[in-house]
Amino acid sequence: MLKQMLNAFAMLLVFTVITGLAYPLAMTGVAQALFPFQANGSIIVHDGKPIGSALIGQNFTSAKYFHGRPSAAGTDGYDATSSGGSNLGPTSKKLVDTVTDNIIKARDENQLDEQKLIPADLVLASGSGLDPDISPAAAYLQVARVSKERELSGDEIRRLVDSHVKVPQLGIFGEPRVNVLELNLALDRLKK
């Protein structure tokens, strides 16, 4: 019986070292060697200072920037410590009111008439509340406002959006998307 307990304890130690130390350290080393940007949080650096992560949405409110998805994370949205959706169901009056307000806001900001359809990602929060991407349709809808505010041609802004559309991985995983932070940084490089 003592021999079995010692064998069990030895196996526990061996597997603890393998799965608790060796494997995580090996995977961390491989990730750092092959994908250092992603392994370190996809931090975007501008003028030598970290300004955000390509993986976490930020709240852009100025008319001269593209706006991301609405956020239900935290009291004011975009709070990474309170990541999560609103958990409101389709029959919730609060959800209907929030979406209606977001539609009105999107129409007002972009000077759209009542007939223009608004992409869902401009009026509905994501599951995490921190989605950094919007659909190409949501970005193109904002081109007129951004070009007017920046005093740049709509074609120039549209080409910028075109250059930032990311296609599905391997052509099949995911949807086409535009990272709002990266697009806005490219916009700043065009003209402030």
Image (cartoon, rainbow, N blue to C red):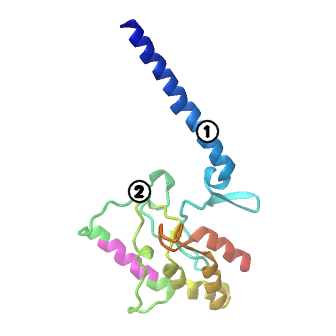
Say which element carries label 1. helix
In this rendered view, identify the residue nearer to me: 18 or 70: 18
Q: Which residues are magenta?
A: 96-106
* 120 vs 75: above or below: below
Residue, disc 2: 84
Amino acid type at circle 2 is Gly
Residue, disc 1: 26
- Prevailing secondary structure class for the magenta stretch in the rendered image: helix
Furthest-right residue in view? 48
Amino acid type at circle 1 is Ala
Furthest-top residue in view? 2
Going by the image, does 121 lie left or right of 43? left
Q: Is residue 10 magenta?
A: no
Residue 41 is situated, as x and y percent measured from the top left of the image, at: 61, 53
Residue 66 is situated, as x and y percent measured from the top left of the image, at: 57, 76
Residue 146 is situated, as x and y percent measured from the top left of the image, at: 60, 83
Contact check, label 1 and label 2, Cβ < 8 Å: no
